[in-house]
């Protein structure tokens, strides 16, 4: 079952997106995590 850990990763990345102290590079990495997670979720569903 991949959905449970994937949902946790996506949830934490969404929470982190609200952190205003992130650098631009960290925000870029966070975007990659989010896009990759969403893509994996589409493949699973």
Image (tube, rainbow, N blue to C red):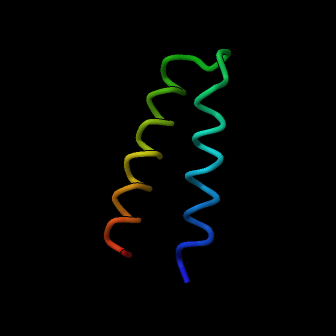
| Residue at the bottom extreme, as displayed | 1
Image quadrant assignment for residue 7? bottom right
Front residue (pair 23, 13): 13
Residue 35 falls left or right of residue 19? left
Quarter of the figure with the C terminus: bottom left
Front residue (pair 6, 26): 6
Residue 25 falls left or right of residue 15? left
Q: Position of residue 31 (x, y in %)?
A: 43, 36
Q: Position of residue 14 (x, y in %)?
A: 58, 40
Image quadrant assignment for residue 37? bottom left
Rendered position, 45 above or below 36: below
Front residue (pair 18, 33): 18
Q: Residue at x 38, y 64 (%)?
A: 40
Q: Residue at x 55, y 64 (%)?
A: 6
Q: Residue at x 50, y 26 (%)?
A: 27
What count of labels does the image hold?
A: 0
| Residue at the front extreme, as displayed | 45
Q: Position of residue 17 (x, y in %)?
A: 58, 30
Q: Position of residue 24 (x, y in %)?
A: 49, 17
Q: Residue at x 55, y 84 (%)?
A: 1
Rendered position, 23 above or below 3: above
């Amino acid at each position: 079952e991949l959905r449970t850990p994937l949902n946790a990763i996506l949830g934490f990345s969404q929470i982190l997106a609200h952190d205003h102290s992130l650098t631009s590079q960290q925000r870029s990495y966070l975007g990659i995590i989010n896009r990759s997670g969403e893509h994996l979720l589409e493949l699973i569903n």
